[in-house]
Amino acid sequence: MDPSSTGIQEPFDLIRLSLSERVFVKLRGDRELSGVLHAYDGHMNLILSDVEETVMIVDAVDGTLEGQGTVAKRKMEMLFVRGDGVILVSPPSRM
């Protein structure tokens, strides 16, 4: 599929086409979000609704980097995500 036929010329076009769709967002600090994208800006600040946050928590053993990992999840109705913490935004898959 030719990207120009879908209206995707720049990276922000992909975000624009994902408005009102469920997106996956990877954040600094081993945090991940899944939610419906309502708004964004040039700094990648995001407003999401119906959000599920997943946090990977690693318990260090004896000061080493190796340890047990646990996953914590929580749900939020609405969330503002500050753009400087965003690593990746993945739009919904389109088949």
Image: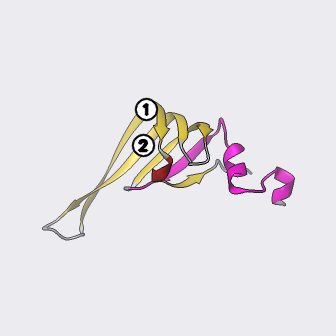
The residue sitting at the top extreme is 77
Q: Which mark is residue 53?
A: 2
Residue at the spot 19% in from the left edge and 71% down from the top edge: 64
Residue 47 lies in the magenta stretch: no
Residue 9 lies in what quarter of the image? Answer: bottom right
Secondary element type, mark 2 = strand
Task: Locate residue 42, reporting x and y percent.
Answer: 61, 47
Of callouts 2 and 1, the N-terminal one = 2
Residue 25 lies in the magenta stretch: yes
Q: Mark 1 — residue? A: 76
Residue at the spot 64% in from the left edge and 49% down from the top edge: 91
Q: Is residue 1 visible?
A: no
Magenta-tinted stretch? 3-28
Mark 2–mark 1 CB contact (< 8 Å): yes
Task: Locate residue 20, reporting x and y percent.
Answer: 65, 35
Q: Which mark is residue 44?
A: none
